[in-house]
Image (cartoon, rainbow, N blue to C red):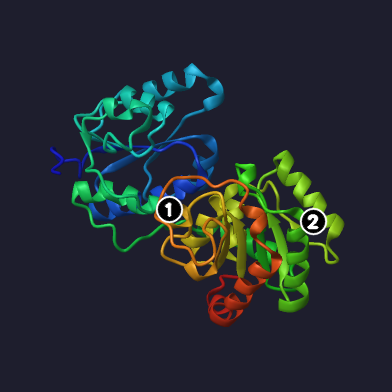
Amino acid sequence: MSVPGDWTRGRVAIVMMSAIGDAVHVLPVITALKRYAPACRISWVLQPGPASLVRGHSAIDEIVLFEKSRGWRAYLDVRRRFAEPFDLVLALQVYLKAGVVTALTRAPVKLGFDRARARDLNWLVTTHRIAPQPPQHVQDQYFEFLAALGVPPEPVTWDLGPWPQERAAQREFFARLERPAATLVIGASHPHKEWLPERWAELSDALVERYGLQPVIAGGRSPRELRTERAIRDRARHQPLSSLGVPLRQLVAIIDGSALVVSLDTGPLHLAVALGRPVISLMGYNNPKRVGPYRRFHDLVVDAYGDPGADYPVSAAHRRGRMPRIEVADVLAKVERWRRRYRDAAAATAPV
């Protein structure tokens, strides 16, 4: 598909507003656009959470906040900020609220997904659509937009930091630890993605006793995460350090300085991949071939989505009730693989 017009020296709007993981997947699209067309000006519509993650990124010229709590006024806010026309809009998000934002922007080219993949009638608010493709990893789906623009995606770069001004605080955090850190991401947006608290506690103790690591609990401060943290502390023989609720930029610094990350299927998993930190992914609800770690650390995935020995296609189908299939021994087998394959390399490249 040929996209008309010259956007390379113009204004480009990115519509992808919500999830942290999706924001991480969008970053290589933005860095590729800037690498190909340094003179373009990129504006990204984001909700406050993911905005706090990427604010200050060198490839992003403007962040336009979409504050969902403001209701219909949030759309008026975006419309006011987007009074000046764009040369190109990339409609990467396909849900209704993103479609409304795309409709409110003015541009000769609004590039979106094909009709089959554009949910909530989003195909009606785009002017051009990428060609249909078989299901694939979401990162590769976003790279389809680059292909339509003739922009090479390689090398895939996130440039997520930590920023230079964040290094001192990162050093201060890790100076308190007597052991290398193992960050445990214990919460997710959906309860069917979560693991049993008593197994987190058993894993935490094993990381201390067998591998000489300091567990650091990470995530938000939702009621479920706080309950899981309390249960871990009640059961664990060695108390983990908690970083629940730290700002996202601080979480980047923590993951970046960790020797190992163990994560549920949630945004920090993709932060670890972007930062090049070995991550053991605990996956059962979502298809790891579609939303698992991108290109890295596939050998550290604990896959409860598929049955043992079974192959399965890439799909967006969910599978409930799978996470209890993951035993502590399954995770420790991946920790042992990390020890043999990644530990020395991670120690050599650790920034702190």
Residue type, numbered disc 2:
Ile
Relative to 322, say whether 83 is above or below.
above
Residue type, numbered disc 1:
Arg
Residue 204 as seen in the image, left or right of residue 305: right
Residue 84 as seen in the image, left or right of residue 100: left
Dot 2 crowding, Cα within 10 Å, few <14, some 14–19, many 20+ = many
Quadrant into which the C terminus falls: bottom right
The image shows residue 259 at horizontal and vertical percentages of 61, 71
**Spatial CA span between label 2 and label 1:** 30 Å
Q: Quadrant of residue 304?
A: bottom right
Relative to 311, say whether 212 is above or below.
below
Discs 2/1, front: 1
Q: Which residue is drawn at 38% across and 34% down?
A: 94
Q: For this rendering, which residue is in front, 254 or 127?
A: 127
Mark drawn on residue 290: 1
Dot 1 crowding, Cα within 10 Å, few <14, some 14–19, many 20+ = many
Q: In which quarter of the image is residue 269?
A: bottom right
The image shows residue 341 at horizontal and vertical percentages of 54, 80
Q: Residue at x 28, y 57 (%)?
A: 153
Quadrant into which the N terminus falls: top left
Task: Give the tally of numbered discs.
Answer: 2
User: Would residue 185 be visible to someone looking at this image?
Assistant: no
Q: Quadrant of residue 256?
A: bottom right
Of labels 2 and 1, earlier in sequence is 2
Q: Which residue is drawn at 23% across and 37% down?
A: 129
Relative to 245, say whether 277 is above or below.
below
Q: For this rendering, which residue is in front, 177 or 233?
A: 233
Residue of label 2:
232
